[in-house]
Amino acid sequence: MPVLRIRGLTHYFGGLRAVHDFNLDLEPGELIGIIGPNGAGKTTVFNLITGVYRPTEGEILFNGHNLVGKRPDQIVSLGIARTFQTIRLFKNLSVLDNVRIARFARMSYGVPAAMFRLPRYVREEAQTRERALELLDLMGLSEQANWVASSLPYGLQRRLEIARALATEPRLLLLDEPAAGMNPGEIAELMELIQWIRRRFDLTIILIEHQMRVVMGICERIKVLDFGETIAEGTPAEIQNNPRVIEAYLGEEAVA
Amino acid sequence: MKRPSFPFVSRVSAPLRATYESLPSPVRRWTMPALLVVFFLVALLSPSFLNLYWQQVLIYVGINIILTASLNLVNGYMGEFSVGHAGFMAVGAYVASILTVWVFPRWGLGAYVPYLFPVALLIGGLAAGLTGLVVAFPSFRTRGDYLAIVTLAWNMIVKSVLENIDAIGGPRGFMGMQKLTSVAWVYVWVVITIYLLRNLVYSNYGRGTLSIREDEIASSLVSVDTRKVKITVFVLAAFFAGIAGGLFAHIIQFINPRSFSILKSTDVLVMVYLGGIGSLGGSILGATVYTVLLELLRPLQVWRWVVGPLLLVLLMIFRPYGMMGMREWRFLVPREERVESVAALMARIRRKREAVAAPTPVGGSSD
């Protein structure tokens, strides 16, 4: 049974058709890439899956749960986490707090338990603190736990964003251009990191990326969007030789 | 971010802290509770060595600390701009006063009113907390300036509703309260308020509140139930404002709707931004400094009411983070949350991982 099943997903911004008839069946453990020129609707697909927008049409099923109409926090609690194209950390908060905030739905004590420091609060907080620090340690951020997030260098901010997504305990991870703004060395490190967290946390991953090196290097399957339409789908080798893809990226003359 | 520093403060605080750090740990653990008890005894005995005027100033300082700390939760920690805090204060003041003046005596409890005072305050706070929902629900869909207008409207609605209920005096106001608020009572409520708010701030809900200020969309996308957090914050802020209102009513013994106008809300705003957003220590500092300042400016008469709004404008331009913005007094940070505790735990976790020698792709052990 697929982890994620998307049928006929369509979204309009006013008169603009951002995504049209998008379909996807994602098997557990798969790593697929979504590519396409700017404005092709890639990020919109992520926003539709995570409940930021409500689709005009179509259905999204995640492990049998219908996601359409659910709030983002409910969707995240079901096990879908994401990162952002432009980094969206909680800039003025500590690295540790950034990760702990992502455990909001995994903690169950109530407001009175917090205000009166009841045993349940003490227990869950201790557990969360430890889990968050363990995760930071795994992600190579152990030295920076007390830092303010905005003071991290760019590469570490990207890594913290991934750590924060992992802290929600996802089954499905959506990465939105994680390699944006990275140099070749950092990109190689990132590719290694993505494959490692996939094994370590047993994840299914959808990756939006402009860096062909990343997509072709680690994705098993690729979908190509252009103007909201799916124009091609297949293995990296198939995509590289697909005339429609070449046309979308390089223009018609290049094909002819 | 630019943060102000105060060399003259650290010149005094550094030696004090050094002395404190040199104490053995059981002594350190009990220093704070012991100080709280000592201050309580001083507050209890204050009528014997302070004249009525200074007692009253202290009481106002305490009431303002409660108002400021609770509004800071909304404006500082959550980053909304509520300008109607006096509306919640009014609800607490009227409910508590009606209880002590009418309800308790009518139930034949007239003699016990001084003992039932905390109950009246709590019920006043609960009533105010309930009205906090009036602002909480619009906040689901409205942010920033628009929500500020909702809170402004709330303040005005409360005032005109009170002016139009003749049974509680209408515009003439409500009186007959005994002078039940003492320095000791205010002290106790301040300590309770700061303790409870501190616990909340360093919890899942407190962090959720901060994340809404930082980036609301991102916070809901890392599983924060923003609605639940907003309800919690608005209701609790209103609750404590209600408590402050009850205390206020039982010191001046006469309340009218004008006492809870937008001017009062502005005062609280000034104290929040003067002390510093996102800081309970800042709230204590801001409320104290501003209250004392207004007393010192008494000779200016009506003109002193220009000082507040003017100060607010200047603060927002030149010192948007206030005296203590985003920082906290060390004793207000729970022990396990302090920087060195976190670092120690981190070191332990790292040693544990290195013992198992699980490889990570990011070289976590090398740096």
Image (cartoon, rainbow, N blue to C red):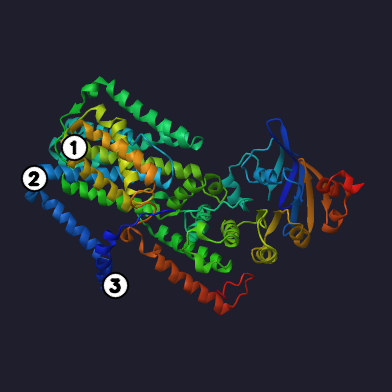
Q: Nearer the viewer, residue A188 or B167?
A: A188
Among the two numbered marks 3 and 1 on one chain, the one whose residue lies closer to the N terminus: 3
State the separation of the CA atoms marked 1 and 2: 18 Å
Among the two numbered marks 1 and 2 on one chain, the one whose residue lies closer to the N terminus: 2
State the separation of the CA atoms marked 2 and 3: 39 Å
Judge whether residue A125 can be spotted in this image: yes
Q: Which residue is mark 1?
A: B250
Helix, strand or loop status at disc 1: helix
Q: Do circles 3 and 1 both sit on a common chain?
A: yes
A125 left or right of B36 in image: right
Q: Which residue is mark 3?
A: B25
Q: Tell me the chain of label 3.
A: B
A87 left or right of B316 in image: right
Marks 1 and 2 in Cβ contact (< 8 Å): no
Q: Residue at position x 40%, y 55% from top?
A: B202
Q: Residue at position x 47%, y 46% from top?
A: B213
Label 2 crowding class (10 Å Cα cut-off): few <14, some 14-19, many 20+?
few
Helix, strand or loop status at disc 3: helix
Q: Do circles 2 and 3 both sit on a common chain?
A: yes
Question: Which numbered disc, 2 or 3, marks the residue closer to the eye?
Answer: 2
Q: Amino acid at mark 3?
A: Ser
Among the two numbered marks 2 and 3 on one chain, the one whose residue lies closer to the N terminus: 3
Residue A198 rendering spot, x and y as whole percentages? 68, 63
Q: Which residue is mark 2?
A: B51
Q: Tell me the chain of label 1.
A: B
Q: Nearer the viewer, residue B109 or B40?
A: B40
Q: Residue at position x 43%, y 40% from top?
A: B80
Helix, strand or loop status at disc 2: loop
Q: Quadrant location of residue A195? A: bottom right
B191 left or right of A71 in image: left
